[in-house]
Structure formats: structure tokens, C-alpha cells
Amino acid sequence: MSQPTQLNRTLPDRIRMALAFEIIGLLLLVPVTTWLLDKPLLQLGGLAVIMSLLATWWNYQFNLWFDRYYLIPRGRWQKTLSERLWHALAFEAGLLILFLPLTAWLLAISLWQALLLDLAFMLFYLVYGYVYHWGYDRLFPLSATLPHDLAAKL
């Protein structure tokens, strides 16, 4: 009996996926937000870029922490359904803590307004992330990123 093959994306594919996600997200979000909030494009664009960089940094840090201090001591890499939910909520709560004062300060708005705006951004990225990754998987199917000889065996 043969071992099951674990399918993973290559590093260049992951970089392309992440960069395209951020760039397309910013191109969609910034003009609409600028129009809705009647704020200068550079002000909202700057905030969005800072938030994107912070989210990328936080994603790396949070997942490193979660793996190192939660999963590895339990001797496993897989998360249960409830752990995935807790992981996602804790990740988003951490982002909110990072973004809230920054948003209020850079846009000169109240913390309440910043909270509503940040929640709207999170909702946008929740929907956008789902649609984007579905589309990416359709446009660049996993087998297309495998070495040719391995892809032929599948």
C-alpha cells in the first residue's frame, strides 16, 4: 500500500498568492472606502497599506506562537474544529487591538467610529478572502504547482 501524497503549494506560488491577495484587496477596498468616508485617497491608502503590513506581520507572529505554545506541546499539528474557531477569533481580536488606535489616530475619528470601520474592513476581508482563495484555486489548481512527474501520478 502506498503512502498518501501530501499536496502543498510551492514557495513561489505561495508568494504569488499572498502578494496578489494584498494588492487586489487594496485596489478594491481603498477607492470604495475613500468615496464612502470622503477622506483623501492617500490618507486611506496609507492606512490600508499599514494595516496590510501589520496583518501580515501579525499572521506570522500569531501562527508561530500558536504552533509553538499550543500545538507542539500537545504533540500534534492538526487543529480540531473548536480550536480552529478559537484560533480565528483570537487572530481577529489581536488584529483589532492593533488596528483600533491606529485607525482612530490616522483618520482623526473616535474609537467607536474606528471600531465600526475596522469591523467593516474585517467583514470585507472575510468575504473577499473566501472569494479570492476559491478563485485562486480555480485559476491555479494545486496539481499545476506540482512537479510534472508527481502531478502525472495523481
Image: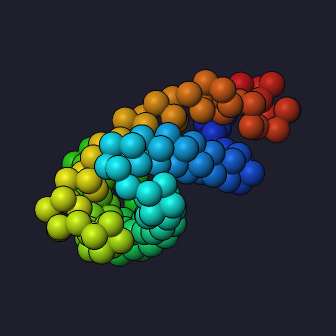
Q: Image height check: is 59 above or below 1?
A: below
Residue 44 or residue 55, whichever sits in front? 44
Q: Image height check: is 145 above or below 75?
A: above
Q: What is the quadrant of residue 113 in the picture?
A: bottom left
Is residue 108 toward the left or the right of residue 61 in the image?
A: left
Q: Quadrant of the C terminus?
A: top right
Residue 142: where, in percent of width, then height?
A: 66, 33
Is residue 7 toward the left or the right of residue 25 in the image?
A: right
The colour scheme used to paint the residues is rainbow
Residue 34: where, in percent of width, then height?
A: 41, 48
Residue 61: where, in percent of width, then height?
A: 44, 72
Is residue 114 toward the left or the right of residue 112 in the image?
A: right
How many numbered callouts? Answer: 0
Q: Image height check: is 138 above or below 146?
A: above
Residue in the image at 68% along x and 31% along y? 140
Q: Quadrant of the N terminus?
A: top right
Residue in the image at 52% along x and 49% along y? 26
Residue 118 or residue 142, whichever sits in front? 118
The answer to whether one can see residue 74 in this image is no
**Farthest-out residue, right:** 149
Residue in the image at 44% along x and 57% along y? 40
Q: What is the quadrant of residue 51 in the picture?
A: bottom left
The answer to whether one can see residue 115 in this image is yes
Residue 136: where, in percent of width, then height?
A: 60, 32
Is residue 24 toward the left or the right of residue 54 in the image?
A: right
Residue in the image at 17% along x and 68% along y? 111
